[in-house]
C-alpha cells in the first residue's frame, strides 16, 4: 500500500523545494516567541538588512512577506502599476506564462513576446519594441531571470542595456525565484526596480517566505499605482519596518533559518557562490553530454547554472523514470512542466559540498516538477513555429502527479 512517508532517507533533487542545510534546520529549532517583545525590533531590522546581500543592493528597500514566490510577483505588480497599464513580458516557460496570467487577471494590458522554450529574453527584440513605443505607454518590462521550466537564464544586465539604448523609462521587474542567492544578481548595477524570490530555492529554506526588494524608482511609482493591494501592500510594511515592527505575525522560525542561510552565503562570498554553481552546472552539463543525452537549452548563452534540464531520448516518458526513481531509490526527481511534460528531467547541481548527507549530492539527477498542479492551466500554444525542438512538439499535456 502507498505510504506518504516511504521508509529511509528521501533524496530530494527538485529545483525547489531543495534540501535544507543542517545549520539552517538547527537555527529554526526555536521555541515560540513573542514578536512584540523588545528583542524583535533589532532582530527584524537585521533580517531585512541581511537580504540585501542576495540582491546585490545597497539602495533598494527589502520586504519579507509570509507567502511564496507567486505572492512576490503579486507584490511587484500591484505596488507599482495601475489597472490597464501596458506591460511587456517575455514568455518562454511555465513560470513566465503564469506571471503573465497573473498580470492579465490583475487587469494589466500585457504585450507578450513568445520565445521558444529553451531560449530567454532577447535584448534585440526588447530594444526594438521599446524604441517603437514612442508614446512611452509601456510602464514595466517583466523578465523571469531563470526560467525553472527550461533551465534558461536571461541576461538582466543585457535587458537593462536594451532599455537604456531605447531611452525607455519603463520599470524593470524581475522574477529571480530560482536565481537570486545562486546566480550573479546585481540589482543596483542593472537598475532592477523590483526583484522577487522565494525561500525554498537558493536560500535552502522551507517554502513560506517571499522576498521582494524595491528600488527608489519603484517606491516612487507606488505613490500613483492604483492596482488593489492588501496583504502585499508595501505601504503597510513601510509604516512599520523601519522601526523593526511588522504589520502582521511574522514566521519567526523561518526568519531564524533565513539569517543562518544568509550567514552561510556571506561566509562563502556571493562571487564564490556563483562560481560554485557555474562549476557544478558545467559538471552536470558535461555529464549529460557524456551520457549522450541532450540539454533542452541548446544555445550555451542561455544555460542556467542553478539547474539543468535534460531531454530524455525519443520514445521514453520521463514521468516513468521519475516514478521508478521514487519507488526504487526513494529519489525525488521532477517531471517536465506543461509543454515539456514527459520529455525532460532536471538536475539541480547547486549545493555546496558537505551540505548534504551524501558527498555526491551535486551530481545527482534532480527534478523539474515542483509538484504544483498548475500545469493544466491553458498555457501558450504558440511555441511550435519551426523551432525544431522535439520537446516543444507537444502542447497542452497535463502532468500526472
Ligand atoms: N518563478 C519561478 C522562476 C519559479 O521557479 C517558481 C516556482 O518554482 C515561481 C516563480 C513560483 O514560486 P512559488 O511556487 O514559490 O509561488
Image (spheres, helix red, strand yellow):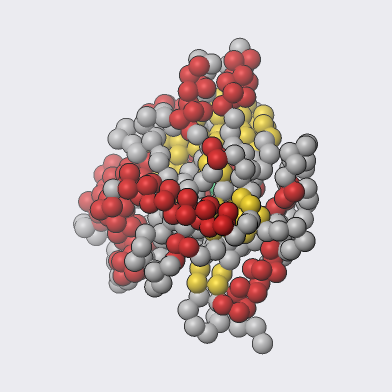
Residue 351 appears left or right of 272: right
Q: Residue 331's spot in the image, x, y percent?
A: 55, 72
Say which residue appears at 49% left-offset and 83% top-offset.
8
Q: Residue 16's spot in the image, x, y percent?
A: 51, 58
Depth check, front residue: 358 or 239? 358
Residue 203 appears left or right of 84: left
Q: Residue 235's spot in the image, x, y percent?
A: 41, 38
Say which residue appears at 37% left-offset and 59% top-offset.
352
The image quadrant where one finds the C terminus is bottom right
Residue 252 seen in render? no
Depth check, front residue: 288 or 392? 288
Residue 371 appears left or right of 380: left
Which residue sits furthest top? 134
Q: Give the quarter of the image for residue 66.
A: bottom left
Which residue sits furthest bottom? 1
Say which residue appears at 65% left-offset and 74% top-offset.
324
The count of marks equals 0
308 to 22, vertically: above or below? above
Q: Residue 96's spot in the image, x, y percent?
A: 61, 42
Depth check, front residue: 164 or 304? 304
Amino acid at each position: 500500500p502507498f505510504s506518504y512517508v516511504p521508509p529511509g532517507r528521501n533524496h530530494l533533487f527538485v529545483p525547489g523545494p531543495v534540501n535544507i542545510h543542517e545549520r539552517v534546520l538547527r537555527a529554526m529549532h526555536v521555541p515560540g516567541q513573542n514578536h512584540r517583545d523588545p528583542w524583535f525590533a533589532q532582530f527584524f531590522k537585521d533580517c531585512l538588512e541581511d537580504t540585501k546581500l542576495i540582491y546585490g543592493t545597497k539602495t533598494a528597500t527589502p520586504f519579507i512577506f509570509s507567502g511564496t514566490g507567486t505572492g512576490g510577483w503579486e507584490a511587484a505588480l500591484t505596488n507599482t502599476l495601475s489597472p490597464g497599464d501596458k506591460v511587456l513580458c517575455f514568455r518562454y516557460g511555465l513560470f513566465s506564462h503564469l506571471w503573465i496570467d497573473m498580470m492579465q487577471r490583475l487587469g494589466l494590458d500585457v504585450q507578450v513576446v513568445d520565445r521558444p522554450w529553451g531560449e530567454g529574453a532577447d535584448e534585440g527584440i526588447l530594444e526594438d519594441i521599446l524604441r517603437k513605443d514612442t508614446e512611452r505607454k509601456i510602464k514595466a518590462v517583466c523578465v523571469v531571470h531563470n526560467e525553472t521550466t527550461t533551465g534558461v537564464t536571461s541576461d538582466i544586465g543585457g535587458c537593462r542595456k536594451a532599455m537604456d539604448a531605447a531611452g525607455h523609462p519603463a520599470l524593470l521587474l524581475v522574477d529571480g525565484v530560482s536565481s537570486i542567492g545562486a546566480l550573479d544578481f546585481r540589482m543596483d548595477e542593472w537598475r532592477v526596480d523590483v526583484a522577487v524570490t522565494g525561500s525554498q530555492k537558493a536560500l535552502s529554506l522551507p517554502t513560506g517566505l517571499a522576498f521582494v526588494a524595491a528600488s527608489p524608482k519603484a517606491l516612487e511609482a507606488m505613490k500613483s499605482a492604483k492596482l488593489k493591494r492588501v496583504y502585499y501592500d508595501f505601504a503597510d510594511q513601510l509604516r512599520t519596518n523601519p522601526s523593526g515592527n511588522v504589520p502582521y505575525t511574522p514566521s519567526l522560525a523561518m526568519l531564524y533559518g533565513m539569517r543562518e542561510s544568509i550567514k552561510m552565503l556571506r561566509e562563502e562570498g556571493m562571487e564564490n557562490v556563483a562560481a560554485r554553481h557555474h562549476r557544478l552546472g558545467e559538471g552536470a552539463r558535461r555529464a549529460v553530454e557524456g551520457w549522450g543525452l541532450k540539454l533542452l537549452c541548446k544555445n550555451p548563452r542561455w544555460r542556467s547554472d542553478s539547474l539543468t534540464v535534460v531531454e530524455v531520448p525519443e520514445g521514453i516518458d520521463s514521468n516513468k523514470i521519475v516514478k521508478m526513481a521514487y519507488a526504487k531509490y526513494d529519489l525525488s526527481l521532477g517531471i517536465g512542466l506543461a509543454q515539456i511534460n514527459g520529455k525532460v528531467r532536471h538536475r539541480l547541481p547547486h549545493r555546496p559540498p558537505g551540505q548534504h548527507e551524501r558527498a555526491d549530492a551535486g551530481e545527482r539527477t534532480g527534478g523539474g516538477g515542483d509538484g504544483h498542479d498548475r500545469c493544466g492551466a491553458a498555457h501558450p500554444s504558440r511555441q511550435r513555429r519551426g523551432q525544431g525542438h522535439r520537446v516543444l512538439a507537444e502542447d497542452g499535456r497535463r502532468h500526472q502527479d
